[in-house]
Amino acid sequence: MHGRLDLPYLAPTFRRFPGSPFVSISDNQRAQLLGVEWLGTVHHGLPPNMLQPCFQPGSYLAFLGRITPEKGPDVAIRIAEAVGLPLRIAAKVPRAENRYFTEQVKPLIDGGDVEFIGEVDDAGKEKLLGNAMALLFPIDWPEPFGLVLIEAMACGTPVIAFRRGSVPEIVEDGVTGFIVDNEAAAISAVGRIGELDRRRVRAEFDRRFSAERMAKDYVRHYRALNAAA
């Protein structure tokens, strides 16, 4: 399961498979669903050459994700405006969020300092994230992992993320980014981004979030199951 596990239909579904082992994508994700035989946690990984790093600090902030209140694009806009930096938004607008986008996000997009790019492919992600000063991740939900966090790290770009869900597991505060508790702290963190070494950010991605590491973790769990059979 790669999504949130606090949905009401999931607990009875899992109970239909007693004794079946499961793997979570973060420790925080599994905390949402008790009474399950968790075999372990395997954080996501990416191929090392999928996104190339840029070690020169950018001149704008980036938001990458879905246009939905739980992801906080409107919060990202307020943070960028407060620090006087441009914001580039690359995001999908789910059909169910058209009203939220139209009423709460679109009026804040001026095509200048706040630019909406739309959906991007891997090449677009590399350009957006690699040339950014930092990624803003002002979430308001129990994020089960946050793939965009490690996509930014692969580009050498530090993140400023709210302390929700899996964020404290993925972001190393003061190394790959800053973990904050509110907008005011996020605004302050933007001013400290220069303290972080973009080469170290990429190095931590290579150490912790490669596809090879992910695969080896799954193989280790499969072998443990075979040994116990």
Image (spheres, grey):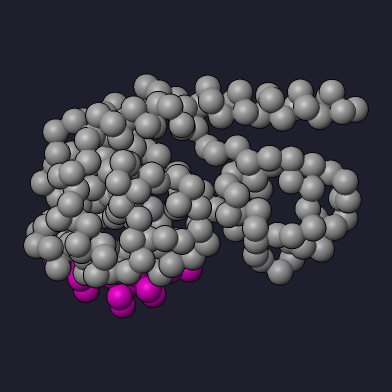
Q: Is residue 171 visible?
A: yes
Q: Nearer the viewer, residue 213 or 61?
A: 213
Examine the rendering and report whether any part of residue 92 can be seen. no
Q: Is residue 169 above or below residue 99?
A: above
Question: Is 55 drawn above or below residue 129 in the view shown?
Answer: above
Quarter that holds the C terminus: top right
Q: Position of residue 32 (x, y in %)?
A: 65, 61
- The verdict on residue 64 being magenta is no
Q: Is residue 155 above or below residue 34?
A: above
Reply yes or no: does residue 109 show up in magenta: yes
Q: Position of residue 150 (x, y in %)?
A: 40, 39
Residue 199: name its quadrant.
top left
Q: Name the residue rendered at 35%, 48% in the picture.
A: 173
Q: Which residues are magenta?
A: 95-110
Asked whether, in this view, residue 30 is left or right of residue 19, the answer is: left
Q: Nearer the viewer, residue 119 or 15?
A: 15
Provide residue 137's location: percent of width, then percent of height. Answer: 34, 56
Tell me which residue sits at (65%, 58%) in the image.
31
Q: Please, what is the dominant secondary structure of the magenta stretch?
A: helix
**Vertical relation: 63 (above or below) 24:** below
Q: Which residue occupies 56% across, 29% down?
A: 214
As rendered, which of 103 and 73 lies closer to the eye?
73
